[in-house]
Amino acid sequence: MLSVGALARVEGEGAMYVRIRGSEVQQVRLDIYEPPRFFEALLRGRSYAEPPDITARICGICPVAYQMSACRAVEDACGVTVDGPLNDLRRLLYCGEWIESHALHVYLLHAPDFLGYPSAIDLARDDRALVERGLRLKKAGNALMETLGGRAIHPVNVRVGGFYRTPHPTELRPLAETLRHALDDALATVRWAAGLDFPDFTHDHEYLALTTAGGYPLESGTPRTTGGRSFTAAGFEHHVVETQVPHSTALHARLADGARYMTGPLARFSLNRDRLPPIAAQAAADAGLGAECRNPFQSIVVRAVEIVCAVEEALRLISAYRPPERPHVPAAPRAGIGHGATEAPRGLLYHRYGLDAQGRITAARIVPPTSQNQAAIEDDLRRFVAARLDLDDAALTRACERAIRNYDPCISCSTHFLDLTVDRR
């Protein structure tokens, strides 16, 4: 038995359990033991205007993802469409979150694994310039979120129908200068990540991500899989089935026919590579990424390409920005059910709300990307361990933790150290 009581350098409280009998890996579990937070129950009875602010508290790293999916679901229920400059501003805000979240993962959580350090602090002692580049990128993403959202953590300027206040073009000009420097850092990140040493490992999960005709998906799109399935956000629950497992307080998910699937950067890239903007597309090609990426250890390269994509897209949106006539579209309450899906940094995030005629929430469902990926992570770990049984327990534990961090699991927003016990038979 290989047991890691608490995983380090992931967001939240989770553990790893591997049972090995001789040369056979009998069981692999990703145990998520963090207590349930009951956000779906907390939303019932609240006003239809409240989900963007309440659900943002689910995650301090990707609050915009929760706000955008919540807004889209409530607006769908109310029969409201947000487009034009207001939707562009939403996309710009989302770019900020992608930049800061991916930079956090690449440099502070994942880079130490590849470079042989226990933490980013230890890495910074030997390569301060590398870590500072990551911090500059994160700061650039935070600046976007602060300007458009009011603050970087749990933005306060987002509302159903748009924003409470939209920026004047002069407020965005300083951001453009910051982002031009960030683009240089982002491209350097891709070059650096592409040169890392990646274990020889691939998976065959079906990928699920949003796709759009107009560009790389962030704030909207149609769910599609590499297996050829395509459905609307309203059809999500007909195609994705969640089940409870004894070892996790988060639900596992599979496609309706039982197929295991994965969402996130690898899925987005593999389904939307031809939709990358020009600079990001060239960076992907220079990094040696093909039509799709099936090695989860190379997710660090794909995230780096997505940083370039988000910076490039943000510069385009700022350059084209013209203030909208009003900061939000009126959204009168009505009885109905609404669905919303956007691409959080870690993958597709789905919300569904039921409203009564007064706009009170009668039902809520939230399906985050990390819970959707649990079954795929466990399958990858089983095969990963089976090929490395010659390692001693300490080395195998480190290898498994590194493998888990490929998926940047966001269980919540805390970090823990390891308690390790080993019992092989």
Image: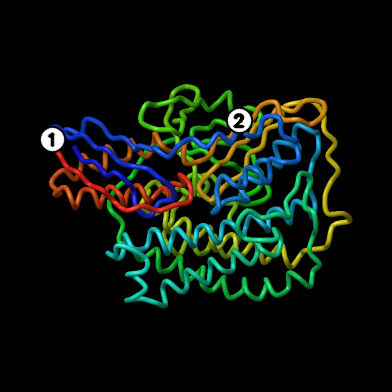
**Colour pattern:** rainbow
Q: Residue furthest right?
A: 325
Determine which of the numbered discs, if any, sits on residue 23 in the image: 1
Instruction: Determine which residue is flagged by label 2.
Output: 41
Q: Quadrant of residue 32?
A: top left
* Residue 5 percent location from the top left of the image: 29, 44
* Amino acid type at mark 2: Ala
* Residue 99 percent location from the top left of the image: 56, 61
* Residue 96 percent location from the top left of the image: 61, 60
Q: Does 144 appear above or below 222?
A: below
Q: Quadrant of residue 74?
A: top right
- Label 1 secondary element: loop
- Label 2 secondary element: helix
Distance between the alpha carbons at the discs numbered 1 and 2: 45 Å
Q: Say few, some or many: other residues with alpha carbon within 10 Å of mark 2 (under 14 / 14 to 19 / 20 or more).
A: few
* Residue 282 percent location from the top left of the image: 52, 63
Q: Does 52 appear above or below 307?
A: above
Q: Say few, some or many: other residues with alpha carbon within 10 Å of mark 1 (under 14 / 14 to 19 / 20 or more).
A: few
| Quadrant in which the C terminus appears | top left
Sequence-earlier tag: 1 or 2? 1
Front residue (pair 339, 262): 339
Q: Does 240 appear above or below 382?
A: above
Q: Is residue 217 left or right of residue 285?
A: right
* Amino acid type at mark 1: Ser
Q: Is residue 130 left or right of residue 360?
A: left
Q: Residue at x 37, y 66 (%)?
A: 120
| Quadrant in which the N terminus appears | top left
